[in-house]
Image (cartoon, helix red, strand yellow):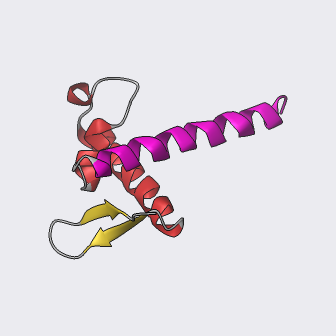
Amino acid sequence: FVGVGSRHDELLEHHEHRFAEVLESIRVGDDTPWAVATRMEWSRSWDRISGFMRRAAVSEAMAHIRALERRGLVREIPGHPVRYEVIPT
């Protein structure tokens, strides 16, 4: 594989961008996994994403939320639906 180092850097940058999107979404009150997914930048607009791809997008948003939880940056707010809040620093 040629360029593995640069690809690694691209992926890290991509995920940091995603983390920033998720944090901003939660900060402004779009704090459910579904709401976060609707605000993320996708290869096409949210209204053009449907079916399995929409569920996959929400799953990706959830994965980023969980990673931010592990970093100690967000926490779940008990209740239904599941919501998240940014932990003040």
Q: Which quarter of the picture shows residue 50?
A: top left
Q: Residue at x 54, y 65 (%)?
A: 71
Q: Which of 64 and 44 lies nearest the eye of the viewer?
A: 64
Does 22 lie within the magenta span?
A: yes
Q: Is 9 above or below relative to 64?
A: above
Q: Which quarter of the picture shows residue 3?
A: top right
Residue 24, percent from left and from top: 36, 44
Q: Residue at x 41, y 41 (%)?
A: 21
Which residues make up the magenta segment? 1-27
Residue 59, percent from left and from top: 37, 52
Q: Which of 46 and 1 lies nearest the eye of the viewer?
A: 46
Report the side of 62 relative to 67 (left or right): left
Residue 58, percent from left and from top: 32, 49
Q: Is 87 above or below relative to 64?
A: below
Q: Residue at x 46, y 43 (%)?
A: 20
Task: Considering the whole magenta stretch, tell me its main secondary structure.
Answer: helix
View extreme (right): residue? 2
Residue 28, percent from left and from top: 25, 46
Report the side of 74 relative to 28 (left or right): right
View extreme (front): residue? 89
